[in-house]
Image: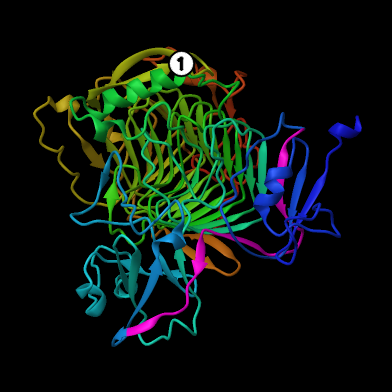
Amino acid sequence: MSPALAAREFHVSPDGNDRSDGSAGARLQTISAAAARAQPGDTVIVHAGVYRERVTPPRGGESDTRRITYTAAPGEKVVIKGSEQIRGWERFRGDVWKVTLPNAFFGAYHPYKDLINGDWFTDRGRPHHTGEVYLNGKSLYETHLLERVLNPQPFALSREPAASTWTWFGESDDKETYLYANFHGRNPNEELVEINVRDSCFYPAKPGCDYITVRGFRLCHAATQWAAPTAEQIGLIGTHWSRGWVIEDNEISDSKCSGLTLGKDRQTGHNVWNADRSKDGATHYNEVIVRALAAGWSRERIGSHVVRRNLIHDCEQTGICGSLGAVFSTITDNHIYNIWTKRQFVGAEIAGIKLHAAIDVVIERNRIHNAHRGLWMDWMAQGTRITRNLCYNNTAEDLFMEVDHGPYVVDSNVFLSDLNLSDMSEGGAFVHNLFAGKILSRPELGRTTPYHHAHDTALAGLSRTKGGDDRFFNNVFVGRREPPEPPKKTANSRANATVTGYGLWVYDTREQPLLTGGNVYFGGARAYARETDATEMAGDRPAVALVEGADGVFLVNCPVPAAQAVTRRVTGEMLGRVVTANLPFENQDGTAITLDVDYFGNRRNAAKPGAGPFGNAMEGSARIKVW
């Protein structure tokens, strides 16, 4: 390697100097200064401290072997914050304090003038700013009236109503911004009080900054905007329409909207539905997809990211989201929780992981709980594999498949929320899962959505979603002995009604039939009407429970499938081809797929694989460690 191409290390420390050369003995002071110098192959090593800056890398690497790496120094705690500490509070009245800041303090971006808005966003009848106030690391609740700071009342929709009485209010004029906060007897000048001032912590200003690694940081406090699928999706950390990032071993929290984004750019459309209501949102999004393809949306230019072992929490829209930009990526071993806890605003984009166009995406071994939706695959999930995930205590459902045409695979997952699966798609294979809650089946005939050529972003066609054409093999269903819910009344025929219940009977009226085999039903869950080899267990519903402790997360009273269950090893050949896309089930690289690994990564018995996610590990066990 020539000297000009030799990889360099740049060291950063709070006591450094940005005029230094960045060597270990002459460190830089800001990560941004190192980013300005770093070239493909270089590594930026950040030492312990708090860095209040937005890192905006001006360039990326050249390949997987010549990437630019940003990493916390081994064993050192490095925090990147989109906030600033604020002192100079004055008592206003009672427990309410006030601070006055010049608008120049915020520079080019002012979070207390910037209102959250965007396609599919609903403000619940009041304004919301991207700014936020934190007391000792805990965010307060914004209110739009000073009276509700002076006399706060619990917000009933919050998952933490008591916390919702810690409130703040902001207003601005041409010169100054005034913030009021109820600190409940605390003196803010003696505590750590911070406010959001930056729209991100780590995000390129332009697309095409490829092959970047971000490792080992604590990233928090960002005034992020609503990340609609038809908009540029700016997260607390995000890839900005690039390729080949590795985001690993970070803690990402306290984003006003989204934590980590793998999303689209602004050029292909930015909140286009709000700008033009003459067409419906689905039509607008189909047009965004066409523009993205014309601009180079392909495997060669976009996606192929690795997101692994991150702790993501306390974000009010998504933990991870990506419209079009997550294609060919892997999202593994992340712990995501407390997503949409405050619930002051709402919208159609809220989930632990929310992806549009999860083409050849692998979502594996993630723990997602205390969210609205757990996993939401919206449009174009094709070649997707969702495997070995743990989902629980999500208020909508654990998994929502929306207007996808397949093929996609959902295998060896543990779904424990009240509603496990909302299936508004077709062409899925559900294999070796534990469904301890309800399933919703619904077609969607009002929208036409894309499907693609195999392992490609290129469009193959558009179709409505009839529902059905799914495969369910070797799953365990746990029900309640209660009358089944009647189909929701609809102007459409019975075949097009929404049906919810325990077990596969909810698909009985779908126009496209299921393929089934080896499924086991407990506690009154009912089989599909055409299912010939179902095993229905007598007795009451097993008292399935999850116990979280310092030594791990345990599943208690998990039902043990009957030995007589007619299970067999599931292969792509057995699953066949989906109707709409006319494609087979196979691995992301196009090779033949065999679903023979259980939740723990152990090889299943080929002759008798057993039903449910745990293979033979659960036999005779009432307590199973699942995380």
Which span of residues is magenta-colored? Answer: 66-91
Chosen colour scheme: rainbow
Q: Give the x, y percent position of residue 255.
A: 45, 56
- Residue 203 vertical position relative to residue 326 in the rendered view, above or below: below
- Front-lying residue, 333 or 11: 11
Q: Give the x, y percent position of residue 382.
A: 46, 24
Examine the structure image and report whether residue 81 is included in the region drawn in magenta: yes
| Location of mark 1 (residue) | 294
> Where, by quadrant of the figure, is residue 501 drawn?
top left
Examine the structure image and report whether residue 445 is included in the region drawn in magenta: no
> Where, by quadrant of the figure, is residue 477 drawn?
top left
Q: Give the x, y percent position of residue 44.
A: 74, 49
Q: Quadrant of the C terminus?
A: bottom right
Q: Residues within 10 Å of mark 1 (few under 14, many from 20)?
A: few
* Picture residue at 51% right of the left edge, 38% below the top: 262
Residue furthest front in the image: 175
- Front-lying residue, 508 or 66: 66
Q: In the shown orientation, is residue 546 left or right of residue 483? A: right
**How many labels were placed on the picture?**
1
Query: Is there any visible trace of residue 469 in the rendered image?
Result: no
Helix, strand or loop for disc 1: helix
* Picture residue at 58% right of the left edge, 63% below the top: 552
Query: Is there any visible trace of residue 275 in the rendered image?
Result: yes
- Residue 461 vertical position relative to residue 434 in the rendered view, above or below: above
Q: Give the x, y percent position of residue 318.
A: 42, 48
Q: Please, what is the three-letter code of the amino acid marked with disc 1? A: Ala
Q: Quadrant of the N terminus?
A: top right
- Front-lying residue, 110 or 153: 110
> Where, by quadrant of the figure, is residue 500 drawn?
top left
- Residue 234 vertical position relative to residue 123 in the rendered view, above or below: above
Q: In the shown orientation, is residue 81 left or right of residue 72? A: left
* Picture residue at 47% right of the left edge, 30% below the top: 358
